[in-house]
Image (cartoon, rainbow, N blue to C red):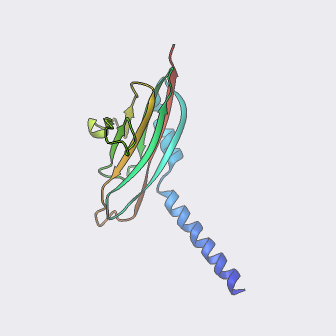
Amino acid sequence: MLKKSLITLVLAAITLFSIHVNAQCKSREITKGCKKNLESYKYSGAAVTDIVIENKPKKYDVEFTAYQGQKYRLIFCSSGNVDGLQLNIFDKPKTIKSRKKVYDNSQGIEGNFWVFEPAKPGNYFVEYEVPAANNETTNKQACVVLIVGYQNQK
């Protein structure tokens, strides 16, 4: 009986923790709000990166492939809980020293989102840099949603 109660208590704690974590990132709402920025591009999908702001800086990586014969528009939307988020896009993975940065968000934010349109087909490596937390933001939850749109080229 004690074992069953303990298991129930642990499952309830995990469920409550999961609800708390997921409540910080309403990815469906963010996606819905940012999809309009695709303009004439067709929606292809979205990738959500959950972020925890800790006492030390952290990096998160996402890879994207642009196929020949299509033109892409990538929209990056933040849950708004990440002050100082740095977005960098590279032409090669971080294991290759000769990689080049093809985009960063220091070029400015357009509303609550950033836009990147790959110039050519290939693999692109997205890196989110999250600064260390200050006392008020330790272990804060956030997310970045990458929305992919495409057009067929003639």
The quadrant the N terminus occupies is: bottom right
The image position of residue 47, as x and y in percent, is 51, 43
The quarter holding residue 110 reads top left
The image position of residue 151, as x and y in percent, is 51, 22
As drawn, 42 above or below 84 = above
70 vs 151, nearest the viewer: 70
As drawn, 94 above or below 116 = below
As drawn, 107 above or below 129 = above
Residue that lies at the very extreme toward the top in this rendered image: 154
Residue that lies at the very extreme toward the bottom in this rendered image: 2
The image position of residue 79, as x and y in percent, is 42, 49
Q: Is residue 35 visible?
A: no
Residue at left offset 28%, top offset 63%:
134
The image position of residue 49, as x and y in percent, is 47, 49
29 vs 60, nearest the viewer: 60
As drawn, 57 above or below 97 = below
8 vs 131, nearest the viewer: 131
Residue at left offset 54%, top offset 31%:
43
The quarter holding residue 124 reads top left
Residue at left offset 29%, top offset 50%:
84
